[in-house]
Amino acid sequence: MSLQAETSNNRPWLMGVRESVPLLGGYIPVAISFGLIAVQSGFSSWEAVAISVLIYAGASQFLFVAMVASGAPLWFVVVMTLLINARHVIYGPNLVPWLTGSRWWPWLMHGLTDQIFALAHTRLPQLAPDARIGWFFGSSLLAWFSWIGGTALGAVAGKELTQQWPLFAEVMPFALPALFLVLLAPRFTSRLWSLALGSTVVVALVFSLNGMTNAAIPVAAIAGAVVFFGLGALK
């Protein structure tokens, strides 16, 4: 039986949930870290959870909490949060060809994260058209709930967890980078992708080691894109 036939006969949302389970290894530790940091910055447990429910933006949430705690103007907090999330302007249109068959797809964009995008961009083209919305719904809903649950756990019991298991506190900050590495690893099977990603890593390391951490990510991203499209044009 083909994959498309299989997804048509089964529950697509359940397949989305099952295939997104590996993401929880990165989501939950980082969410716990956010919940703990939010409470330490003066937010209540309920406020920390509300931020994860309504904003749900990973790195932007950490920035949001830090800026609010430092007394930054609200307009500046909003602008910086939107700038960090500007990448979603690229994510959304890339998924439109596979999700616009349903009127519900705009409402599901709240669940679009870096990891869900990477997974969906690979999986949606492989699914039957009538299974795509269901798959995306199950996948994004599991990720969202795990992020909310992790935030609640961190806000309520994060301090106790890190005191009882000090190693946990040291591992949590690396959870998100590790999750991105897992998503990128399959791309190293392609020579073109390997060169592009390798150049991105090298440029980021060079800038970071020379104290230019703020410029490392954007410059490395540009370098990787130039290598990818430059070598691609030579083929």
Image (spheres, rainbow, N blue to C red):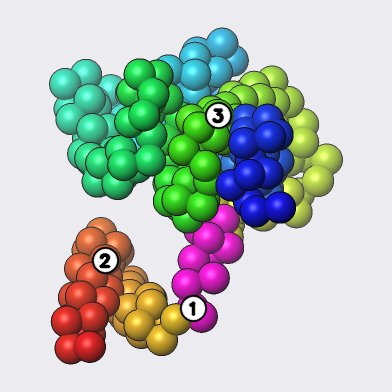
Residues in magenta? 179-189
Q: Which residue lies at the image location 35% right of the left edge and 19% below the top edge?
A: 103
Residue 36 in which image quadrant = top right
Element at label 1? helix
Q: Is residue 136 magenta?
A: no
According to the picture, the residue beneath numbered tag 1 turns out to be 188
Residue at the (49%, 66%) spot, across then down: 184
Image height check: is 233 above or below 100?
below
For the residue pair 211 and 108, the one nearer the viewer reads as 108
Provide the residue designation for mark 2.
Answer: 221
- Between the C-alphas of marks 2 and 1, the distance is 16 Å
Disc 2 vs disc 3: which is toward the camera?
Answer: 3
Q: Residues within 10 Å of mark 2 (few under 14, many from 20)?
A: some
At 58% from the left edge and 63% from the top edge, which residue is drawn?
A: 182
Residue type at mark 3: give it. Gly
Count numbered badges in the picture.
3
Q: What's the distance in space between the residues labelled 3 and 1, CA to CA?
A: 30 Å
Instruction: Name which of mark 3 and mark 1 comes first in the sequence.
Output: 3
**Residue 69 occupies which quadrant of the picture?**
top left
Q: Is residue 30 left or right of residue 209?
A: right
**Can you give x and y, in whole percent of width and height, for residue 39 in the image?**
55, 23
| Residue 77 left/right relative to 142 | left
The amino acid marked with disc number 1 is Phe
Disc 3 vs disc 1: Cβ atoms closer than 8 Å?
A: no
The C terminus sits in image quarter: bottom left
Residue 134 is labelled as: 3
Look at the numbered disc 2 and give the secondary structure of its residue.
helix
**Three-letter amino acid code of the residue under disc 2:** Ala
Q: Is residue 181 visible?
A: yes
- Which element is circle 3 on? helix
Dots 2 and 3: beta carbons under 8 Å? Answer: no
Q: Image check: 177 left or right of 227? A: right
